[in-house]
């Protein structure tokens, strides 16, 4: 989706958009934030901050927070929601060009469910910015849709004879947009390519209802995204 489409979602963000901080079912974010060895005066940069839920929940641990989103109306709502929080700079900017304004500043750079464009060139521009804003030895916390989880969900859809959207190179139709999904090894490889060493990789789980399905007794696993803490080398 482009920024105009995202702006259209600003008023109904909570209902229409998946918010990792709010919707996760297994408290992984807290664990992954704790796993980063952050200095006392750490700086957080949230790339594609949405309504600012991560800033709201974890921002108090940081001396300074920079939250970036290209949708002005979403940033306006985030500012309102996080009005009680001091030390936050809200930036309306495309991540691909945000480095100029942000600089190499992050002890923790967060980018959750943002690097999902079907275009490899667009994804590459975001990975590059993520690497550039993260200080050497600083951390990136990334959440991306899991292709393995999508296969699990599709198997269920097949069982109930629903039509499946086709997929190519991990690009899957979800709701009303096409989104890149990553296999675990692919996520590790792309982070390595952009100068990160993976410290911790796991699953951030969601209820089956987020996929429009009910959990069955035989289900051992909830649908998930990949969550990864990586350190810039
Ligand atoms: C799926 S939401 C995720 C929001 C938040 N990170 C979360 O975890 O809930 C994606 C957000 O990224 C923003 N976004 C997507 N592509 C962007 C880009 N290239 N530059 C800046 N913001 C972008 C959208 O406006 C939207 O607010």
Image (tube, helix red, strand yellow):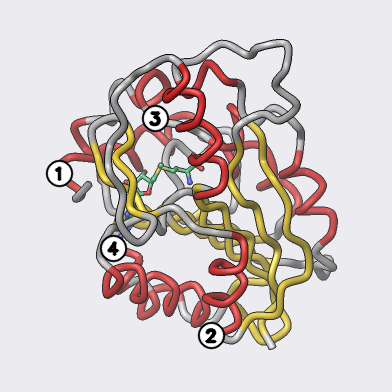
Around disc 4, counting alpha carbons within 10 Å, would you say few (fewer than 14), some (14 to 19), or many (20 or more)? some
Secondary structure state at the residue bearing disc 3 = loop
Q: Nearer the viewer, mark 3 or mark 4?
A: 3
Residue marked by disc 1? 4
Mark 3, residue position: 17
Return the residue at label 4: 94
Which badge, 3 or 4, comes first in the chain's sequence? Answer: 3
- The image shows residue 217, relative to residue 145, as above or below, that is above
- Whether residues under marks 4 and 2 lie with C-beta atoms below 8 angstroms apart, the answer is no
Give me the residue at 60% from left, 82% from top: 192
Query: Disc 4, ligand 1: is the CB inside 8 Å?
Result: yes
Distance from disc 3 to disc 2, alpha carbons, whole Å, reads: 30 Å
- Sequence-first disc among 4 and 1: 1
Kindly check if marks 1 and 3 are in contact, taking CB atoms under 8 A apart as contact: no
Label ID, residue 193: 2
Q: CA distance from mark 3 to mark 4?
A: 19 Å
Q: Earlier along the polypeptide chain: callout 1 or callout 2?
A: 1
Residue for point 35% across, 23% down: 16
- Horizontal side of 198 relative to 102 (left or right) equals right
Q: Quadrant of the C terminus?
A: bottom right
Q: Is mark 3 within 8 Å of ligand 1?
A: yes
| Residue 86 screen position, x and y as percent | 60, 46
């Amino acid at each position: 989706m482009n920024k105009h489409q995202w702006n259209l979602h600003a008023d109904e963000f909570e209902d229409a958009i998946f918010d990792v901080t709010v919707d996760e079912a297994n408290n992984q974010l807290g664990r992954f934030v704790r796993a980063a060895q952050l200095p006392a005066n750490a700086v957080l940069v949230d790339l594609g901050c949405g309504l600012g839920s991560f800033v709201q929940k974890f921002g108090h641990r940081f001396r300074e927070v920079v939250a970036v989103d290209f949708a002005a109306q979403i940033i306006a709502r985030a500012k309102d929601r996080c009005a009680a929080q001091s030390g936050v700079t809200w930036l309306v900017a495309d991540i691909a060009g945000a480095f100029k304004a942000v600089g190499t500043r992050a002890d923790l750079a967060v980018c959750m469910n943002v690097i999902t464009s079907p275009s490899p060139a667009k994804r590459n521009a975001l990975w590059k910015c993520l690497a550039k804003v993260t200080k050497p030895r600083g951390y990136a916390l990334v959440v991306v849709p899991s292709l393995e989880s999508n296969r699990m969900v599709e198997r269920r859809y097949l069982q109930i004879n629903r039509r499946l959207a086709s997929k190519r190179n991990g690009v899957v139709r979800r709701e009303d947009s096409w989104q890149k999904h990553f296999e675990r090894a692919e996520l590790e490889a792309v982070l390595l390519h952009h100068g990160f060493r993976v410290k911790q990789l796991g699953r951030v789980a969601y209820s089956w209802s987020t996929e429009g399905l009910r959990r069955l007794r035989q289900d051992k696993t909830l649908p998930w995204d990949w969550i990864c803490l990586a350190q810039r080398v």
